Image: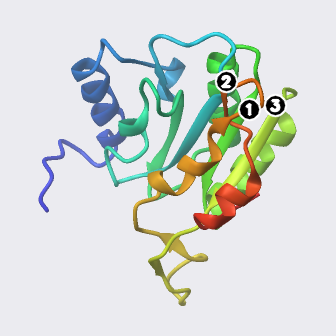
Amino acid sequence: MKKLINGADTVLEESLDGFAAAHADILLLGTERKFVRRRTLKPGKVALISGGGSGHEPLHAGFVGRGMLDAACPGQVFTSPTPDQMIEAAEAVDTGAGVLFIVKNYEGDVMNFNMASEMTGREVASVVINDDVAVEKSTYTTGEIDLHDRSSRCRGYVDRGKDGRRRGRGRHAACRSQGARR
């Protein structure tokens, strides 16, 4: 697949600006392009946040919208987002019901999302999603990198509570059955 890129130093900023302009009715860019968030938030809903390295567009930001993620944090190309991005995203989209970080099983993402959940000072749960297909560890990689259908792995985690309302904290067995672990 070919991509048109004006310059390697500006590829992330330009792709985020274009994506936000194309979908201005659905989403907003956070300050300094640290995250992409839903334009309209639902009060009392657990905020769902994910993210990861850019270069797989529109992987993370493409799942921001109604019934999906509330925010996504894009890292630089093939680099995990930083904890401050996740903290700012959590502050922007938490409507009072807490935050669920949906983390791909890549060492950098796991480390940075864990740091963010410890530093954020709010109620945060995390789920690490695994995959069926991964790049095997080698001298050229840092841990395994998920490649296949990350988004659907977590659907079982968002279920209904005893009161019938949808919430991000569900039965952990639903997650494990889809390859995710807490």
**Amino acid tagged 1:** Gly
Q: Classify 10 Å Cα crowding around label 2: few (below 14), some (14-19), many (20 and above).
A: few
Q: Residue at x 53, y 27 (%)?
A: 70
Q: Where the N terminus falls, by quadrant?
A: bottom left
Q: Is residue 106 left or right of residue 96?
A: left
Q: Earlier in the sequence, mark 3 or mark 2?
A: 3
Distance between the alpha carbons at the discs numbered 1 and 2: 6 Å
State the quadrant of the C terminus.
bottom right
Q: Amino acid at mark 3?
A: Thr
Q: x%, y% of residue 76?
A: 46, 48
Looking at the picture, tell me which residue is in the foreground, 1 or 168.
168
Horizontal and vertical percent for residue 38? 47, 20
Mark 3 and mark 2: Cα distance apart in space? 26 Å
Asked whether residue 9 appears in the rendered view, the answer is yes
**Residue nearest the viewer, comparing 85 with 130:** 130
Whole-number angstrom distance, CA of label 1 to CA of label 3: 25 Å
Name the residue furthest bottom: 138
Q: Would you place residue 95 above or below residue 77 in this image? A: above
Q: Is residue 13 left or right of residue 116?
A: left
Residue density around tag 1, few if under 14, some if 14–19, many if 20 or more, within 10 Å = few
Q: Secondary structure at mark 2?
A: loop
Whether residue 80 can be seen here: no
Query: Which residue is tagged 2?
Result: 165
